[in-house]
Image (cartoon, rainbow, N blue to C red):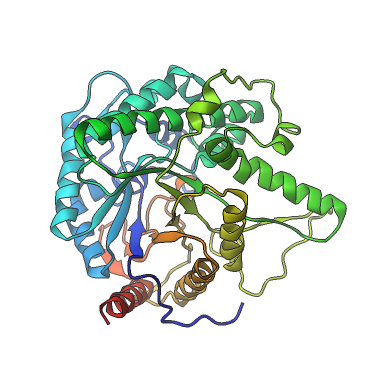
């Protein structure tokens, strides 16, 4: 890819934002009636988190949300994507609502509105209430009904105050990392169970979409409703038949496994033919429920799948390197992915890039953080995004991941994705050079609109 222009002009209506999730930043794990989630349980088990940490305090956003919203406003973006902690607003995942929990999100929405920042809500960013896990969690079909009731309650209370509501964030991770290899909560390692979990997640999405549509029609609210999927193009390492076939299988089991039910009402046959279906149970009406129209599709992009059947596997030869997570930096993959999605799914709704970002081993010197790697990453990916849009892909928003350094799941606090550095001992926030670059870039887009 050639070096990108620094002042690429996007559509005047394009939305610029930043993103976070509840468990990664909020802290206040037992404050004001919040119940435990599976991540509270998981992180308190020895050996689950690389640095032995938990999200008990995290970025203390629960107490510092006003300061954090002020930082978002200082960046000049128009939108903030965040998730609601289900167990904060409904401690058991069923039964009584916790008004103190809803009050927190109401105060957050008030602050965002004061600053002119649109709220984009995610209902589920992996933190299932432990009360539901105790009854089987996502393996229990009843959880899908509880999720629909939770979605309806959020839509009833906040539907007129938010710009969009996403049902799930990255159900692939919930299923495959939570149940496939035990890397994430709840820490189960059984690929057959992971497949069943993925179906229940999709079913809960469909039920929640139906419930929220009814609520929004009843109360006259009109947030955009959708889902957020992590996706990647799968590219064969060579032109061998084995590598090509393996890449197609990888794409089918990851991207198409979630996209096809939502947009085509069926699972991809290539995946069904190879997956362990021993625990797979689908009711007759399930696919119709999952196949709900969306107002937007959230796409999270970080890397491609580079697929090799050789032993040892062939490695990519790109010149852009790897992030601190060990993920290959491959911006053109975003262009390739978006063009492929548009080709495969004619009924695709507008796309939001709901996550894109880079973990960097940031070093503070003289009170400043010169994270040039992250700036280059942003430039290259925004250029790749613009290339896809120039080819006709309807992308309407970009949310950088993440606003703050935060609890990076099983990596703990060792990996930093933020535009803003967080000193976890003092909770001091420091804008990195990438934050200033993003601010100036967004400002240039605003000026272009006004011209």
Residue shown at 21%/52% (left/top)? 65
Left or right: 152, with 230 as reference point: left
Left or right: 443, with 42 as reference point: left
Left or right: 94, with 263 as reference point: left
What is the x, y in percent for residue 317? 72, 70
Residue shown at 27%/43% (left/top)? 222
Picture quarter containing residue 1? bottom right
Count of numbered circles on the image: 0
What is the x, y in percent for residue 210? 38, 29
Q: Is residue 58 visible?
A: no
Q: Is 377 or 152 nearer to us in this picture? A: 152
Q: Is residue 247 above or below residue 378?
A: above
Q: Is 222 or 334 nearer to us in this picture? A: 222
Q: Is residue 59 visible?
A: yes
Q: Is 283 or 367 nearer to us in this picture? A: 283
Q: Is residue 246 above or below residue 11?
A: above
What is the x, y in percent for residue 113? 16, 54
What is the x, y in percent for residue 183? 56, 39
Picture quarter containing residue 268? top right
Q: Is residue 199 above or below residue 122?
A: above
């Amino acid at each position: 890819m050639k070096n990108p222009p620094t002042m690429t002009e996007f559509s005047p209506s394009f939305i610029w934002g930043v993103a976070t999730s509840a468990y990664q930043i909020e802290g206040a794990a037992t404050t004001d009636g919040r119940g435990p989630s599976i991540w509270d349980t998981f992180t308190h088990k020895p050996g689950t988190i690389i640095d032995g940490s938990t999200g008990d305090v995290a970025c203390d956003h629960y107490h510092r949300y006003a300061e954090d919203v002020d930082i978002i406003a200082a960046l000049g973006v128009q939108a903030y994507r965040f998730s609601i902690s289900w167990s904060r607003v409904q401690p058991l995942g069923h039964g009584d609502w916790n008004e103190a929990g809803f009050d927190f999100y109401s105060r957050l929405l008030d602050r965002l509105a004061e600053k002119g920042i649109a709220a984009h809500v995610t209902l589920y960013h992996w933190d299932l209430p432990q009360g539901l896990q105790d009854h089987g969690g996502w393996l229990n079909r009843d959880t899908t009904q509880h999720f629909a009731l939770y979605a309806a309650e959020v839509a009833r209370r906040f539907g007129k105050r938010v710009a969009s509501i996403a049902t799930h964030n990255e159900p692939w991770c919930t299923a495959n990392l939570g149940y496939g290899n035990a890397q994430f909560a709840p820490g189960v390692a059984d690929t057959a169970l992971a497949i069943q979990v993925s179906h229940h997640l999709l079913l809960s999405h469909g039920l929640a979409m139906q419930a929220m549509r009814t609520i929004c029609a009843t109360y006259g609210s009109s947030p955009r409703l959708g889902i957020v999927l992590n996706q990647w193009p799968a590219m064969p390492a060579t032109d061998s038949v084995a590598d090509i076939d393996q890449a197609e299988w990888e794409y089918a089991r990851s991207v198409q496994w979630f996209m096809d039910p939502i947009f085509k009402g069926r699972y991809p046959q290539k995946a069904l033919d190879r997956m362990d279906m021993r625990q797979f149970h689908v009711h007759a009406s399930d696919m119709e429920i999952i196949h709900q129209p969306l107002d937007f599709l959230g796409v999270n992009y970080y890397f491609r799948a580079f697929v090799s059947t050789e032993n040892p596997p062939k490695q990519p030869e790109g010149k852009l390197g790897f992030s601190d997570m060990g993920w290959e930096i491959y911006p053109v993959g975003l262009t390739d992915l978006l063009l492929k999605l548009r080709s495969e799914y004619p009924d695709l709704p507008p796309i939001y890039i709901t996550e894109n970002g880079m973990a960097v081993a940031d070093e503070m010197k003289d009170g400043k953080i010169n994270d040039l790697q992250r700036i280059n990453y942003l430039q290259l990916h925004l250029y790749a995004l613009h290339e896809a849009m120039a080819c006709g892909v309807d992308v309407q928003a970009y949310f950088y991941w993440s606003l703050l350094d935060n609890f990076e799941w099983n990596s703990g606090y060792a990996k930093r994705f933020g535009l803003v550095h967080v000193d976890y001992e003092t909770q001091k926030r420091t804008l990195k050079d990438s934050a200033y670059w993003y601010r100036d870039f967004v400002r240039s887009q605003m000026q272009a609109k006004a011209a």
